[in-house]
Amino acid sequence: MAHLHITPADGLLDEPRQIVLEGLAAGARVTLTSQTVRGNGLLWRSSATFIANAQGRVDLTQDAPVAGDYAGVSAMGLLWSQRPEQGRSSA
């Protein structure tokens, strides 16, 4: 079973985090999506697709996405690449 680890789990949007997904099959393709609610209840979202390594692990501090809203290795890529969802709010 896959496990997602985010450290720290809570914090300000610009606080560095480590995001690791473990327990995948080697070579598995997995898409991670992040969503935040910002001012006036507007939803912001991003996603990125990764390939699990031989140990069945994806670590955003080491692995670049193969598709998605950002390119290259970036521990915080899922946050800084978020864009507002037009016409969508949390209300």
Image (tube, rainbow, N blue to C red):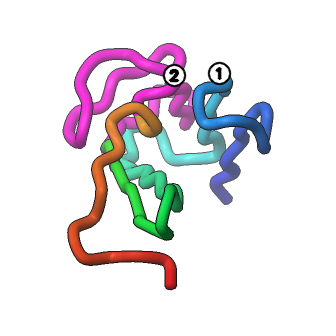
What's the magenta region?
Answer: 49-77
Q: Position of residue 81 (x, y in %)?
A: 33, 36
Residue assigned mark 1: 16
* Residue 52 among magenta residues: yes
In the displayed structure image, the side of residue 3 where residue 75 appears, left or right: left
In which quarter of the view is residue 87 placed?
bottom left
Residue at image location 41% in from the left, 76% down from the top: 89
Q: Position of residue 4 (x, y in %)?
A: 67, 48
Residue at image location 30% in from the left, 56% down from the top: 84
Q: Position of residue 51 (x, y in %)?
A: 35, 36
Q: Give the vertical position of 11 relative to 88 (above or below).
A: above
Q: Give the vertical position of 35 relative to 16 (above or below).
A: below
**Does dot 1 land on a helix, a strand or a loop?**
loop
Q: Which mark is residue 69?
A: none
Magenta: predominant secondary structure element? loop
Q: Earlier in the sequence, mark 2 or mark 1?
A: 1
Who is closer to the viewer here, 80 or 87? Answer: 87
Residue assigned mark 2: 75
Type of the residue with mark 1: Pro
In the displayed structure image, the side of residue 50 where residue 19 appears, left or right: right
Residue at image location 34% in from the left, 22% down from the top: 64
Residue lying at the far front of the rendered structure = 40
Q: Position of residue 83 (x, y in %)?
A: 29, 49
In which quarter of the view is residue 8 placed?
top right
